[in-house]
Image (cartoon, helix red, strand yellow):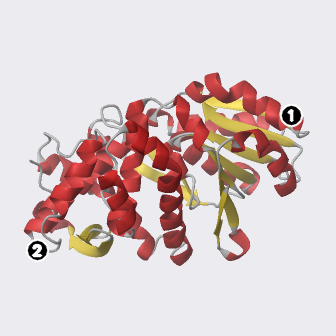
Amino acid sequence: MKTVKVDLGSDSYRIEIGRGLLSSVGEKLRQLTKAEKIAVVTDDHVRRIYGERIREILKGAGFDVKVIAIPAGEASKNLRVFGDVLEALAGFDMSRSDALVTLSGGVPGDLGGFAAASYMRGIDFFQIPTTILAQIDSSVGGKVAVDLRSGKNLAGAFYQPKGVFIDPDLLSTLPTRYAHDGLAEAVKYGCIGDRELFELFESIETKEDLEKNIEEIILRSVLQKTKFVEEDQYDNGSRQMLNFGHTIGHAIERYFHYSTYTHGEGVAIGMSLLSAQSEKLGYTESGCTDRLRAVLKKLSLPTAIGVPAEELILHALHDKKRRGKEITLVVMKEIGRAELVKVPTEALADWIVTE
């Protein structure tokens, strides 16, 4: 088993990575919390597969357990479902000393974490991510949120978990599309800070290669995410590097009402389009876009979209990375290195170009 410490002073916690880890989560939680009750926030897909198993694991460690399942999908990450979860916590008669566990992909993780931050002004919470996207990205770093009609993740908080337990065996039930969806974020980490991770993706040729290297991919991604979170917990500086591909990606998700493209697919297109344009503008080393697109296509991820650029720009203006009349874009300088570029909103047409 691998352990990564997220060093944030009084908010520090550990991320544990290991096959078969789920079976020992109850004992680990017993050592980390004084809770008598644990609410497990998940979605209806994950509940069917793991709901009873997690209930028995936690009950075996002496906890009183309630499993709260929300409808699967980004459309559930809204204020109405958020309110339903808070009411369920209150209906379970949870106290401030009790705890919440998210067993899920990114949507229940974000929404459940925000519920933990809000219920009685904050209770302990723990993450057990069940998708690649959640294991390598959204379960780490303490960003919890829901979407508003105006845009993605516009209501939320910074609220760190007390522990993250990553079991790669949980990925065995993940449909292929959503496995590849999550890997878009790992490719992102290779682009912005880990050239060797990117080159690992270039070397992978088969499904067997990918499965053999998945723990290394998860670990290297978590280490990258941890580095940026420790440098900039509240996302005012270098942590914004993690948004590579996200300004366009979020605009794509919003344009299609979170129904056509997954988050990772949107990010893949965003990285591809922005890199192509930044290479044309002389910001990105020649050839990087071709290498990036080759890796994305190998993972069955899209690299272009038939939506007018002006439509994406309109949605990008609602992005939370906008500050007044400027928006910060993450531009890859070369494989493994990126920088933040502040762009006036009226100049976005120079950067967001569809093909």
Q: Quarter-wise, where is residue 148 in the image?
A: top left
Up the image or down, 291 lies above or below 340; here it is above
Residue 243 visible (yes or no): no
Which residue is the extreme one toward the top?
A: 48
Instruction: Look at the image and tell me in which quarter the N terminus lies.
Output: bottom right
Q: Which residue is mark 2?
A: 282
Q: Residue at x 56, y 62 (%)?
A: 141
**Neighbour tally class for label 1: few under 14, some 14-19, many 20 plus, Cα within 10 Å:** some
The total number of labels drawn is 2
Residue 326 visible (yes or no): yes
In the structure shown, which secondary structural element does the residue marked by tag 2 occupy?
Answer: loop
Q: Are marks 1 and 2 in contact (CB under 8 Å)?
A: no
Up the image or down, 70 lies above or below 268; here it is above
Q: Quarter-wise, where is residue 260 in the image?
A: top left
Residue 180 has which mark?
A: none
Q: Which residue is mark 1?
A: 59
Tell which of 214 and 116 is nearer to you. Answer: 214
**Neighbour tally class for label 2: few under 14, some 14-19, many 20 plus, Cα within 10 Å:** few
The percent position of residue 276, horizontal first and vertical second, equals 14, 59
Look at label 1 and name its amino acid. Answer: Lys
Look at label 2 and name its amino acid. Answer: Gly
